[in-house]
Amino acid sequence: MGLKTKLAMALATSAAGAAMIAGGTFAYFSSTATNTANTFAAGTLRLTANGVAGSSSTGAMDITNAEPGTSFDQTWTLENTGTIDANSLSAAVSYTSTIPSGNTVDFSGEDPDFGSQLYINKILVGGTDVTSYVENELHASTPLTLEELQGKTISFGPIGLKAGASTTVEIQGDFHDTGAPQNYYQGASVVGQVAFTAQQ
Amino acid sequence: MLQTKLKLAALAAGSIVGAAMIVGGTTYAMFTSTATNTNNTFAAGTMNVTLTRDNSDLVNVPGPMFYTSASDNTGSYPYDKNIGSGSGELPGGWAPGDTLSRYADLTNKGSLKVQIYKISATADSQNVIHPGSGSTVYTGATSGPAYNYFIQQMQITITDQTGATLYQGPLSTLVNGGYTLPTPFTMAAPSTDNLKFTAYLKPGSDADDNQLQGKNFIFDFNISARQAP
């Protein structure tokens, strides 16, 4: 009798032990705390020039029949239609100069780029004169010529454009009368674009 | 000789019992008695942990830690009256370089002490504000190049109320499989730990960053607890 009882208990214990060794998964309690729907909405920075989205100017300067001494004054309107303030503005200028093939130079070494004759006397952003800033930035002469802007991106300094705000970029200049013959440039033209960029 | 016999007897007894065990199912008609101990109770404890926003608001307002103005249930902006510019949203929206810190209470509301062992995040495709008429639905990207770039650039730092860092790294790790704490910590029942979540959108190249413009990214933050050893 004693023997039987002892054996019975021993069997029971080993059975339990076997289950513990054999079992791979254990049903532990667990709980997960969740904070839901955290929303990160990215803002936008959108620039329009003269009311057209993108960065190319369409209020293009269109001067015809100019002669040495003719001045020009062109203004573009920029608007930040996004939600993020822009901290800086810049402009990239590129153009093509054409001189009629029959033209002859007035003197040896005359510049074949008509842009060399177009002087930019003043650049204003939102009414602020940034001419010296741009000249220093480009290590350019005073006054600045369009040729010196060719293919360059110029920053206007610490002038930004808040979300929803608009500003103007104005250039004043002339087809400069150098005092020397400029017949080489009769019928010449420059056609180009200004690409404005706003940066956060 | 006597010894041998005893030995043999003992051995025999062993083998008989052994044989009986192998065969199994033999019953003996012997005296028995049963003693019963009643009303043994095994009551399971409970595990319940919650993660609720808590920026020391004057009013305890539920909802996500990071939110947009449309999700302000009380209609006041920003509705964390104690926090000025550190509210859960950024006017104008997130832009590369922005950083924002928010707080949430991790609370053990159950009866059992728990071990916090994992942090993860889940991307949501939608956040419906004020369900029903007049609701605003934010649609979140949950895949694609802009999403992949966002979760790689968005850096998350989570610290507990002692200032110890629980996690510091990109959101992508939390979303893709989660992060198992190298040193899980125990929370008594009941207890609360005020966690600080800092989100920082690391800037990259202009071209890469610009793909994020105007997009929404919505996440659940999950903290996993299990039985404490």
Image (tube, rainbow, N blue to C red):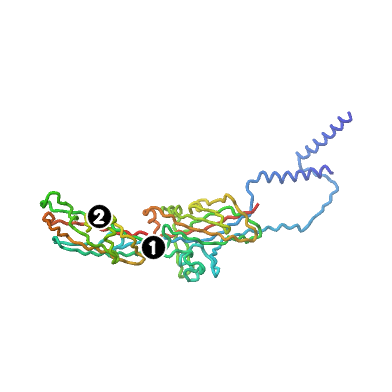
The number of discs equals 2
| In-front residue for pair B104/A11 | B104
Instruction: Using the rendered image of the protein, determine whether residue B105 is visible from the camera's viewpoint.
Output: yes
The quarter holding residue B224 reads bottom right
The quarter holding residue B223 reads bottom right
Going by the image, does B177 lie left or right of A42? right
Q: Amino acid at mark 1?
A: Ile
Q: Where does the image place residue A80, in percent across and percent down from the top left?
A: 34, 64
Dot 2, crowdedness within 10 Å: few (<14), some or many (≥20)? some
Instruction: Using the rendered image of the protein, determine whether residue A50 is visible from the camera's viewpoint.
Output: no
Chain letter behind tag 2: A
Q: Which residue is mark 1?
A: A84
Chain letter behind tag 1: A
Q: Where does the image place residue B221, in percent across and percent down from the top left?
A: 52, 58
Dot 1, crowdedness within 10 Å: few (<14), some or many (≥20)? many
Please identify the quadrant where the N terminus of chain B is shown: top right
The quarter holding residue B119 reads bottom right
**Mark number displayed over residue A140:** 2
